[in-house]
Amino acid sequence: MIALGCDHAGFELKEAIKEHLSNKGIEITDFGTYSTESVDYPIFAYKTAKAVASGECEYGILCCGTGIGISIAANKVKGIRAAVCSEEFSAEMTRRHNDANILCLGGRIISKETAIKLVDIFLSTPSESGNHKRRIDLISDIENNIEIG
Ligand code: RB5
């Protein structure tokens, strides 16, 4: 199950991604927003991020104007590693090296075609172990107020 969320500026992108994933037979939960009427992105970041952090959804995809505000909000939820990407290399590497669980995209930055490419890369790339796992564990330590370094 893939969680989708957006604000008004990411709505069109979210709809395109929703259609693409549905066509591929991938199950999604759409946490809104459901129109281009102005809304506050933290609300949709929070709903989507909670669904991923709880395990209800495996990954999340969030869209706002730049992808930045919605990623900052999502990253406040414990267990979330949300990454803003606008090109293919980052979408691949944030899965391989950061084990990112939410992909954030900017509806005012990238085209629908690029967004769909990034979504496909993100959802099909595994995370790597070794050094990368150790660093992700250190990120969790920061989240849990454990002193590091
Ligand atoms: C909304 O105008 C815009 O600020 C929002 O979509 C996002 O880009 C924030 O980071």
Image (tube, helix red, strand yellow):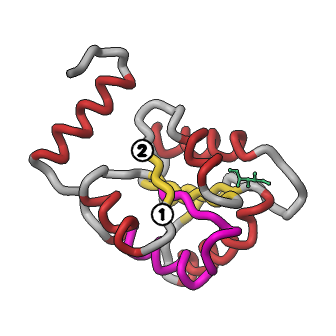
Q: Mark 1: which amino acid? A: Cys
Q: Residue at x 56, y 47 (%)?
A: 71
Q: Residue at x 25, y 59 (%)?
A: 96
User: Mark 1 or mark 2: which is in front?
Assistant: 1
Q: Mark 2: which amino acid? A: Arg
Q: Observer-nearest residue: 42 or 28?
A: 42
Figure quadrant of residue 12: bottom right
**Label at residue 85:** 1
Pointer 1 with pointer 2, Cβ within 8 A: no
Q: Position of residue 70 (x, y in %)?
A: 63, 48
Give the spatial CA distance, label 1 vs label 2. Answer: 13 Å
Figure quadrant of residue 148: top left
User: Vertical placement of 124 versus 66: above or below?
Assistant: below
User: Vertical placement of 146 versus 112: above or below?
Assistant: above
Q: Residue at x 12, y 45 (%)?
A: 131
Q: Position of residue 87 (x, y in %)?
A: 45, 73
Q: Position of residue 78 (x, y in %)?
A: 45, 30
Disc 1 on helix, strand or loop?
Answer: loop
The question of residue 83 being in magenta is answered with no
Residue under label 2, please give it. 81
Q: Residue at x 30, y 63 (%)?
A: 93
Q: In the image, is 95 to the left or to the right of 86?
A: left
**Identity of the residue furthest to the front in this view:** 149
Picture quarter with the C terminus: top left
The residue range painted magenta reads 103-122
Disc 2 on helix, strand or loop?
Answer: loop
